[in-house]
Amino acid sequence: MAEEALIREAGDKYRSFLHDEAENITQWRHGGPPMYDSVNQLFEEGRTKEWPKGSLEEVVQNAIKSWEMELSHKTRLQDFKTINPDKFKLIVNGREGLSGEETLRIGSYNALLKSSLPKEFQYYKADEETFESSHDAFRSALPRGFAWEVLSVYSGPPVISFKFRHWGFFEGPFKGHAPTDEKVEFYGFGVLKVDESLRAEDVEVYYDPAELFGGLLKGALISPCQSEDNTVNTATATRGCPFSK
C-alpha cells in the first residue's frame, strides 16, 4: 500500500533516494519530493519492532519504504532507483504479475487490491479506480497515513522473505462509510528477489484483504443526504431528506 505524504524539500531517515538526486531531473507527481512527517510519527508511535541500525531487518524495511515512495510519487519508471525496470514484476496473492509500467500506471493500492472475485463480492473494485481516485480514497480514510513495518526477515539477498504489518487509524470516510476512529491493520508475507545492486526484480506479496476491509467497512453508512464530511446537504435540508421519509 502507500504511506501517504505531503510535499517539502528535506530529508527522510527511512527512505533512500528521496533527496539525493545528482541532478534535478526527477519528475515528481506533485511537483517535488514528498514529506513523511505524519506517517513517520505514526510509525514510530505504533511499531512493534525497532531494528538495530544496519541490521538486515532495517535494510529490508527501508528498502520497501523507498520503493513505495517512488511508486507513489515518481511519474517515470526511468527515475526509479529501487527496481530493475527491465525485469520488475509485482505478484499479489498468486495472481498474474504486473510489470513496472503497469504497476506505476494503476498505482500501489489498485495493484495490491485487485481481485478475481465476481464484482458483487468485491470489497473494493480496483478495475473501476484510477491511480488518483484510489489514493484519494485511502488518504481520506487514513489522514495520518498508512504505516508499514517489517516484523521478521527469514532470508537475506538475493531472495529476501519477510513478514510485515500495515496499519493506520480510520479517521475519515471511506466509500460511503463513516469513520470509527479505530485502528485498522493487516499482516502479510513478502518475497523480494533483488539483483547485485539490490534493486527489486520480483516482489511477491501475500495477505488477506478482508483484514483491512473488515475495519474500513465497519463504519456506519453515511446518509445520502449527508456529505462525507458529516455536513448536511443544503439542497435537501429545506425540503427534507427523501430517504428518511
Image (spheres, rainbow, N blue to C red):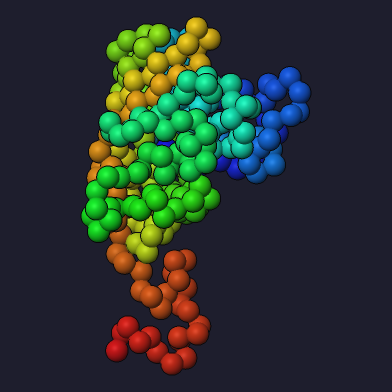
**For this rendering, which residue is in front, 10 or 217?**
217
- The reply to whether residue 44 is in sight is no
Q: Is residue 165 above or below residue 63?
A: below
- Residue furthest to the bottom: 239
Residue at image position (28%, 56%) is 119
Residues 37 and 239: in front is: 239
* Left or right of residue 236: residue 24: right
Q: Residue at 38%, 49% (x, y): give it.
A: 126
Quadrant housing the C terminus: bottom left
Q: Is residue 235 above or below residue 15?
A: below
Does residue 211 appear left or right of residue 224 in this picture?
left
Q: Position of residue 148 (x, y in %)?
A: 41, 32
Provide residue 242's location: percent of width, then percent of height. Answer: 35, 87
> Is 63 drawn above or below residue 8 in the view shown?
above
Q: Is residue 93 visible?
A: yes
Query: In this image, 13 relative to 116: left or right?
Result: right
Query: x, y percentage for residue 50?
Result: 40, 20
Is 195 above or below relative to 62? above
Quadrant of image for the N terminus: top left
Q: Locate residue 206: give its quadrant.
A: top left
Look at 29% across and 26% down and name the residue there. 189
